[in-house]
Amino acid sequence: MDQILDRMKIHDEWQERYLIEYRAQRNFHAANLRFEEDATLEVRTTFRRPDTIESQVLRAEGSRLIRERVFDNILKAEVETHSKLVKQQVDIVPRNYSFSYIGQELCDDRKCYRLGITPRRREQYLIQGQIWIDAEDWSIVRIQGSPAKRPSFWTRQTQIDRRYKRIDRMWLNDSLESTSDILIAGRSTLKIQYLYEAIETDRSMEHLEEASVPCRD
């Protein structure tokens, strides 16, 4: 377990220095089944090292309530969680979580380690659930679970499934799906898809990760 967490830490630090900037187009879709309401949002999001994230709305359609209560809050939370201080408090590291080993699985034909994660504090941005770690790159490739603290009184339960895609040995967001059980409103769903338009990296860091990772068994 310690070896997996140590290698995760090395990869995360390498990726933070390797990735300079990216630009991605994201498609949001949210729906409430009981009231038959839905909304879509297209945004162009730019990340710049170390912690700047900006999103420009390209198109918004559908329920105004969903757009204001769901999409606007997501974009606001992304800016908040990318700040250095908050990121340190929500990163999936031993400072914020305890871990348990579950086993090995294949993730899109790649060997992965599956770990249980338990937050050390009851906070909204921390997740109770499980993660999958790529056995070659030592990066998180999937997160599944529920917020350690309910986002609001009205939200009784939320299940989140976030997946990442491998690009140039980095693992970047690929999709997010969530289902929430909301008091009175019932079941609501959210999906976010990522399409990367441009990625800038620091080529001087290409071989540094290989030199830093301990020899594999």
Image (tube, rainbow, N blue to C red):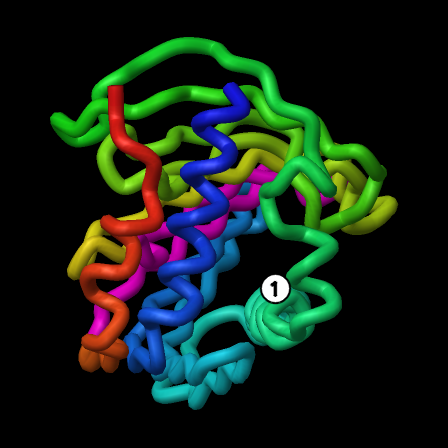
Q: Nearer the viewer, residue 44 or 135?
A: 135
- Residue 64's spot in the image, x, y percent? 58, 75
| Residue occupying the point 53% across, 69% down | 63
By secondary structure, the bulk of the magenta-drawn segment is best described as strand
The residue that mark 1 highlights is 70
Q: State yes or no: residue 175 in magenta.
A: yes
Q: Is residue 38 left or right of residue 165?
A: right
Q: Is residue 181 visible?
A: no
The image quadrant of residue 217 is top left
Give the SS element for disc 1: helix
- Residue 176's spot in the image, x, y percent? 41, 49
Q: Nearer the viewer, residue 210 or 135?
A: 210
- When the figure is inspected, residue 71 is found, relative to residue 175, above or below; the finding is below
| Residue occupying the point 43% across, 48% down | 10
- Residue 128's spot in the image, x, y percent? 66, 30
> What is the span of residues highlighted in magenta in the rendered image?
171-196
Task: Identify residue type, mark 1.
Answer: Val
Q: Is residue 131 left or right of residue 135?
A: right
Q: State yes or no: residue 207 in magenta.
A: no
- Residue 137's spot in the image, x, y percent? 27, 41
Neighbourhood count class around disc 1 (C-alpha, 10 Å): few under 14, some 14–19, many 20 upward:
some
- When the figure is inspected, residue 216 is found, relative to residue 55, above or below; the finding is above
